[in-house]
Amino acid sequence: MNGLRIPRNPWVRVALVLPMFAGIALLFWWRGPDWSVVYHAFDPVNWSWIALAVGLNLVSVLSRAVAWRLTIGQALDPPQPAFHRVFSAFGVGLLGNAVLPGRIGELARVAVLRRRLPHGRGTSAALAGTVFAHRLFDVVPALLLVAYVLLTAKIPHWAVTSLIVVSGIGIGLFTFAMASAKRHHRPVLDGAGPVKRLVLMARRGLSVMKAPLAALGAIVFQCAGWFMQLLAVYVAMRAFDVHAPLPAAGLVLLLMNVATIFPLWPGNIGLLQAAVALPLVQYGVAYSVGFAYGLVLQVVEMSVGVGVGLVFLAREGLSFATLRGMPDATNVELDADAEADAREESDALLPRAGVPG
């Protein structure tokens, strides 16, 4: 059964996307902040603080790439990919997430790294699984930050509910991961292609859970990446002469992540800025100033992802058109791996059932 496909005709795409952008623009005009105040909020900005925030975000990206490399080391047989190959693929994935819909940069980084590996069938599924596990390790620093914020920050009531719900989902996913890592048999997958891919990715990537030191190392580097992001959010406040404490920066970072879990439109622009500005009102920051600050935070984050991604996209000798097609190619490989695994499992069950082969 084929899923819903995006039309390839560019004019059809424009016709589909244009009403959405028009609706977002109308919503901004009707319910948005005082745009003149937002404009003048940039007048006193100290751009040296913004440059420092960009540098901290770059360190965060490096730390997260190290965490992914440790995860890959437990999912693939030797020879292992060099760190610069992993960082290159990670950078291209950041670019894909920043400029393409649906967070398909996660599959793009699999495709980029897969090109550099000599392994045969199953490598794409194993790499996709490491992406799943790598993202799962975000649960640990996120929960630590939630606990810190709940204990120290001024939190609006609506934000408390959001943080509790997201934390519950994260704990559930991590518990599932720990339980799945202890299972050694391969289930027969009779569902649709996407279901097979999801289960296959989870099973392959969660092999890192069986190596406590590697898993701990990946979690530590993920925590370091989050801490660098927290510092980036904090120093960016100083650029706007906002002297809110570190717990306020932690609250902003958490709500930014909550606002971007589901990509409703490109960058979730507007929603992210509202998620940044509203909690800062508790600290005496005008909503329009907080909105402007949210715009800068998004630019800081995207500048690192897009900048690093473009450098490595060129280094890999790839075009933007190739980047857009990578997720489809990766999906084909994952479907083939899932079907091959299901056949192997079925063949292995035949002797047990007494059926002649």
Image (cartoon, rainbow, N blue to C red):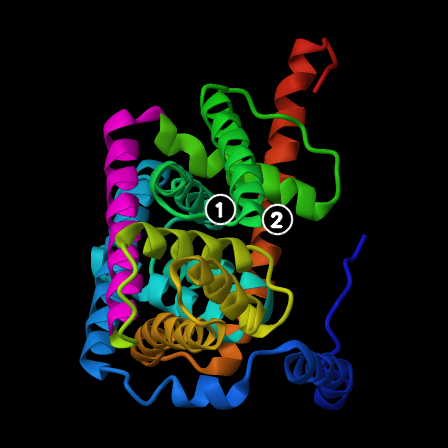
Residue furthest to the front: 284
Question: Residue 193, relative to residue 344: is it above or below?
Answer: below
Residue shown at 64% from the left, 80% from the top:
28
Residue shown at 56% from the left, 73% from the top:
270
Quadrant in which residue 141 is drawn:
top left
Q: Residue 121 carries which label?
A: 1
Q: What residue type is labelled 1?
A: Arg
As rendered, which of 237 and 190 lies closer to the eye? 237
State left or right for residue 226 relative to residue 192.
left
Q: What stretch is highlighted in magenta?
A: 210-238
As rendered, which of 337 and 194 lies closer to the eye? 194
The reply to whether the C-beta atoms of the residues labelled 2 and 1 are less than 8 Å apart is yes
Q: What residue type is labelled 2?
A: Ala
Question: Residue 7, relative to residue 243: is it above or below?
Answer: below
Circle 1 Cα neighbour tier, 10 Å, few/some/many (<14 / 14–19 / ≥20) = few
- Distance between the alpha carbons at the discs numbered 2 and 1: 9 Å
Q: Residue 145 carries which label?
A: none
Picture coordinates of residue 212 (x, y %)? 28, 26
